[in-house]
Image (tube, rainbow, N blue to C red):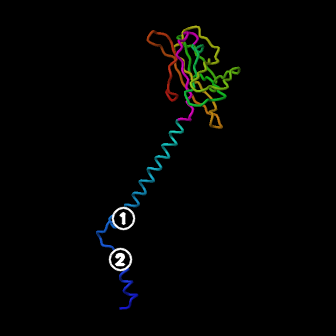
């Protein structure tokens, strides 16, 4: 037998590993490799999405409006509303407008207002820093002759966050209700409520 053919056969024997060798046990079938890659891809994608959500929740503006003042029964719109920045960054060029959805006293006198509402001309809030509050009035000079029984208002707050080049506007709805002492106060409502 020629020497070259003996070398080729010995190389083939060396290349052919027995079935129980450690290297063949470590090799994964093709389907398991694909599954492993798919799991790694999914975990990586979830990590990227989780990081993006975490960053967004940290930098996103959180502006709220509230009112804890007791109301004069004939002048519900004389109470102050508090615009608060609960976010981690300042908001700029803050403006607001009030839209009365419904207002009625106990003898059925009603206020009818344009759907756009009223915006104060003389009040501009340049900045509200994190954890700061600005107290504002709805610019309605109306007063009722009798106590109010129904009042429903939406306050639209418009502002520009630090890191976004455009303005955002968010609605906050309130309705008049009696507290446990029988005094009128503004309570928050969902904007979609009927």
The 10 Å Cα crowd at callout 1, few under 14, some 14 to 19, many 20 or more, is few
Q: Where is residue 32 in the image (x, y as percent from the top left)?
A: 37, 60
Residue tagged 1: 27
Quarter of the view holding residue 5: bottom left
Direction from residue 16 to residue 50 in the image, left or right? right
Q: Which residue lies furthest to the front in this view?
A: 3
Quarter of the view holding residue 144: top right
**Under tag 2, what secondary structure?**
helix
- The magenta-colored residue range is 58-75
**In the rendering, which numbered label is found on residue 51?**
none
Q: Nearer the viewer, mark 1 or mark 2?
A: 2
Quadrant for the N terminus in the image? bottom left
Residue at 47 percent of width and 13 percent of height: 178
Q: Does the magenta stretch include residue 64?
A: yes
Residue tagged 2: 14
Q: Residue furthest left?
A: 20
Quarter of the view holding residue 137: top right
Magenta-colored segment: predominant secondary structure: loop
Q: Where is residue 189 in the image (x, y as percent from the top left)?
A: 50, 24
**Relative vertical location of residue 77 with respect to residue 115 in this rendering, above or below:** above
**Relative vertical location of residue 50 with respect to residue 71 in this rendering, above or below:** below
Q: Where is residue 174 in the image (x, y as percent from the top left)?
A: 53, 21
């Amino acid at each position: 037998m020629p020497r070259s053919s003996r070398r080729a056969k010995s190389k083939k024997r060396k290349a052919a590993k027995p079935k129980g060798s450690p290297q063949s046990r470590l090799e994964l079938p093709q389907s398991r490799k694909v599954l492993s890659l798919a799991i790694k891809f999914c975990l990586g994608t979830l990590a990227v999405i989780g990081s993006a959500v975490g960053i967004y929740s940290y930098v996103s503006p959180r502006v709220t409006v509230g009112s804890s003042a007791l109301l004069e029964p004939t002048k519900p719109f004389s109470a102050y509303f508090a615009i608060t920045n609960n976010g981690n960054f300042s908001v700029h060029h803050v403006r607001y407008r009030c839209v009365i959805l419904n207002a009625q006293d106990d003898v059925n006198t009603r206020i009818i207002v344009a759907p756009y509402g009223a915006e104060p001309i003389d009040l501009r809030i340049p900045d509200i820093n994190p954890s700061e509050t600005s107290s504002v009035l709805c610019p309605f000079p109306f007063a009722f002759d009798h106590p109010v029984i129904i009042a429903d208002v939406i306050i639209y707050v418009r502002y520009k966050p630090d890191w976004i080049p455009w303005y955002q506007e968010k609605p906050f709805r309130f309705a008049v209700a009696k507290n446990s002492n029988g005094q009128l106060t503004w309570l928050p409502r969902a904007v979609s409520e009927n």
